[in-house]
C-alpha cells in the first residue's frame, strides 16, 4: 500500500535535508511524495506563506513532512507583511494539529557533546507534549502607537484533549507545567488536568510544577521527567531548553498530531540560512522526524525503529556533523545512516 506524503522543503537548509530524507524513506517502503512551496519560498512566488492549494493537499495526505522555514530575508515587524512562520501557524490551525510531541533522549555516543555534564544527562528519556493551537499565540491581539496586548485564553476542552495525549503516551508519570500562582488560565489548566487524571488515568502518577521551577529542573535533574505537558508558550520555551540536553538542536525531531487527520513531522531546528548551500547541514533531526512520521503518522513501528537504530549506530561508529564537533557534511551523514539501515 502506497502512503501519500506531502513534502514541504521550505527555506534555507530545508531542501538540502529533505532530499536525503526521501532517499532514506524510499529504501523502507512505498511512498508517493508531493512537493509544494511553503514559508519564505511561497511568499516569494505567491505572496503568502501557505496557499489554499497547499493546505488542501496537506488535508488529503497521509502525513506532512516539513523541513524548515524562515530567514532574515523575510524578517519584518510590519504586521501587514507576510512572515514564513504564518505558514506554520496556518498549517497547525488548518489541520487541527493541537498536540506537539518532542522527545528528548541524548544518545550515549553524544553525551560529551552536551553542554551539561555527562552524569547530569545520563539516562534522560523524556517527552515534551506541548499544546499547539491555543493560548497566547492565537489569542486576540491589539496594537496602538503606545501599547500592545496578547490575550491568553484556554477552554476546558482544549486543556483536556492535550492532557489526555500526555497521559496516554506517559510510561509512569506526567508533569503538568503551569504558572498557577499567577495566571487564571493556569489555574483552570491545573483543575482540568487533575479532574481528567482522577477520572481516566489514576494509574499514572501526576505532579504539578511551576514553569520557572520546571526550567530549572530540566537543567539540574532532567532524569526526573517522564512526560511533560504544558501550554503553547511554555512548551515552546521548555522544549528548546530541553533540546540542549542532547548536545545539539540539530538532533531533535518533532511530531504535531490532530485527533484524526494527517500529522505534521519536522525537525526542531530552524532553516540555518548561514550554512545553506554549504553542504554542512546535519540531516539527522530530519531523519528522526521521518521516523516519528513512520511511527505516529503511518503506524509503521518497525520501519521507525530501523531509522532510529541506523542513526544511533552511525553515531556510535563516529559520525559527527559540524554542530556535533565534527566535519561530516550532509552527504557523508546520509551515507553513514543508509549504510547502517
Image (tube, rainbow, N blue to C red):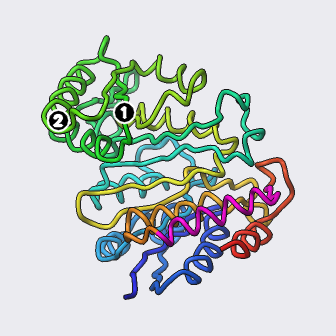
N-term mark: 1 or 2: 2
Q: Is residue 317 magenta?
A: yes
Query: Which residue is found at the position 45% from the left and 85% from the top?
Result: 32
Q: Secondary structure at mark 1?
A: strand
Residue 171 percent location from the top left of the image: 38, 42
Q: Give the left or right position of residue 156, taking residue 74 as reference.
A: left
Residue extending furthest toward the top: 181
Q: Which residue is mark 2?
A: 155
Residue density around tag 1, few if under 14, some if 14–19, many if 20 or more, within 10 Å? some
* Quadrant into which the C terminus falls: bottom right
- Above/below status of 280 relative to 117: below
Q: Secondary structure at mark 2?
A: loop
Residue extending furthest toward the right: 327
Q: Nearer the viewer, residue 204 or 166?
A: 204
Residue 333 percent location from the top left of the image: 75, 66
Q: How many marks?
A: 2
Q: Quadrant of residue 198?
A: top left
The residues bearing labels 1 and 2 have C-alpha atoms spaced at a distance of 24 Å
Query: Which residue is found at the position 30% from the left and 73% from the top?
Result: 56
Q: Give the left or right position of residue 244, taking residue 162 as reference.
A: right
Range shown magenta:
302-320
Give the dominant element type of the magenta stretch: helix, strand or loop: helix
Q: Is residue 330 magenta?
A: no
**Res. 173 mark:** 1
Q: Nearer the viewer, residue 42 or 197?
A: 197
- Above/below status of 25 relative to 222: below
Residue 15 percent location from the top left of the image: 62, 70
Q: Nearer the viewer, mark 1 or mark 2?
A: 1
Residue 65 percent location from the top left of the image: 47, 68
Amino acid at each position: 500500500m502506497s502512503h501519500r506524503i506531502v513534502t514541504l522543503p521550505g527555506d534555507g537548509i530545508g531542501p538540502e535535508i529533505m532530499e536525503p530524507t526521501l532517499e532514506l524513506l524510499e529504501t523502507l517502503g512505498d511512498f508517493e511524495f508531493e512537493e509544494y512551496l511553503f514559508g519564505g519560498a511561497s511568499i516569494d512566488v505567491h505572496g503568502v506563506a501557505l496557499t489554499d492549494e497547499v493546505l488542501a493537499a496537506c488535508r488529503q495526505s497521509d502525513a506532512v513532512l516539513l523541513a524548515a522555514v524562515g530567514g532574515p530575508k523575510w524578517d519584518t515587524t510590519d504586521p501587514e507583511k507576510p512572515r514564513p512562520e504564518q505558514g506554520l501557524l496556518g498549517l497547525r490551525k488548518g489541520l487541527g494539529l493541537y498536540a506537539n510531541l518532542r522527545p528528548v533522549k541524548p544518545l550515549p555516543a553524544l553525551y560529551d557533546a552536551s553542554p551539561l555534564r555527562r552524569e547530569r544527562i545520563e539516562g534522560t528519556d523524556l517527552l515534551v507534549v506541548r499544546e499547539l493551537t491555543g493560548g497566547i499565540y492565537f489569542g486576540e491581539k491589539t496594537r496602538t502607537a503606545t501599547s500592545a496586548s496578547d490575550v491568553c485564553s484556554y477552554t476546558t476542552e482544549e486543556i483536556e484533549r492535550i492532557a489526555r495525549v500526555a497521559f496516554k503516551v506517559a510510561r509512569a508519570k506526567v508533569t503538568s507545567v503551569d504558572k498557577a500562582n499567577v495566571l487564571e488560565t493556569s489555574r483552570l489548566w491545573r483543575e482540568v488536568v487533575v479532574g481528567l487524571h482522577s477520572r481516566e488515568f489514576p494509574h499514572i502518577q501526576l505532579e504539578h510544577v511551576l514553569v520557572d521551577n520546571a526550567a530549572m529542573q530540566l537543567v539540574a535533574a532532567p532524569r526526573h521527567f517522564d512526560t511533560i505537558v504544558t501550554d503553547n508558550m511554555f512548551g515552546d520555551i521548555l522544549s528548546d531548553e530541553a533540546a540542549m540536553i542532547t548536545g545539539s538542536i540539530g538532533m531533535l525531531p518533532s511530531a504535531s498530531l490532530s485527533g484524526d487527520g494527517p500529522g505534521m513531522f519536522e525537525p526542531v531546528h530552524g532553516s540555518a540560512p548561514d550554512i545553506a548551500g554549504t553542504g554542512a547541514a546535519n540531516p539527522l533531526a530530519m531523519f528522526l522526524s521521518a521516523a516519528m512520521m513512520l511511527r505516529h503518522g503511518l503506524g509503521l513501528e518497525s520501519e521507525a525503529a530501523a531509522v532510529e537504530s541506523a542513526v544511533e549506530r552511525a553515531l556510535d561508529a563516529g559520525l559527527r556533523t559540524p554542530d556535533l564537533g565534527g566535519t561530516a557534511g550532509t552527504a557523508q551523514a546520509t551515507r553513514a545512516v543508509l549504510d547502517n539501515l
